[in-house]
Amino acid sequence: MTHVLHPGDVVCVDRGERVETLLGSCVAVVLTDARRSIAAVCHLVHAGDGATTAHGAAALHAMEGLLGARGFNAQHCEAYVYGGGNMFPALVTGTHHVGLSNVRWALAELADRGVPVLAQDVGGDGYRRFAWTVGPGAPEVRQMPG
C-alpha cells in the first residue's frame, strides 16, 4: 500500500508499506524503530506550536501517539529529516527563510527528545521527492531544480 502525504498529514505505517510526498519549504520527519518494522512520518508546514498537524509540535505529538498506540516509544526511535528548501531564492537570500526555520526547529526538537538523526537532506533551492518503503533501506530523496 502507498500513502501519499500532503501538507499537514501524519501517518504510521508498517514494514512493506510505502510513503511518498513532495517537499518544498516543508519538512518530512520520519521516526522509525531500529529494525525498520514501523515508521511514523509527517509533512510539517510550520515550525513550532499550532492547533493542527501542519505545525511541528502537533505533528510530532501525533506521531508519538500513533507509535505509542502500536507499543513503540518514539524516544527509542531513530529519525530522518528531509526538505526545508528555499522555494523563492530570488526573493529570499541567506539563512532566513521558512524552509530553514522548519529544519532548525525539527532538528532541535529531535535533539531535545534524544532521538538520533540518521540522515538528513535539507536546505538548498527547489523541492524534493521523498519516497520510502519501510524496511531495511533508507528513504529515497531526490532534490529537483526550483
Image: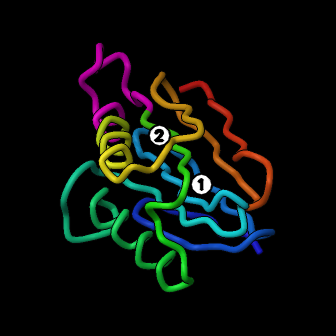
In the foreground, 73 or 13:
73
In the figure, residue 16 lies in which quadrant?
Answer: bottom right
Residue 23 position (above or below residue 86): below
Q: Please report the residue visible at 79 percent of the width from the left and 48 percent of the height from the top.
A: 137
On-image quarter of the N terminus: bottom right
User: What residue is drawn where x is 42% and y is 36%?
Assistant: 84
Q: Residue furthest bottom?
A: 69
As measured in the structure, the alpha-carbon distance from the residue carrying label 1 to the one carrying label 2 is 10 Å
Q: Nearer the viewer, residue 60 or 98?
A: 60
- Magenta highlight on residue 94: yes
Describe the element under mark 2 as helix, strand or loop.
loop
Disc 1 crowd rating (10 Å Cα; few below 14, some 14-19, many 20+) is some
- Residue 146 within the magenta-colored segment of the rendering: no
Q: Is residue 124 above or below residue 53?
A: above
Is 63 above or below relative to 136? below
For this view, does 115 lie left or right of residue 140? left
From the image, tell me which residue sits under label 2.
24
Which disc, if any, is residue 72? none
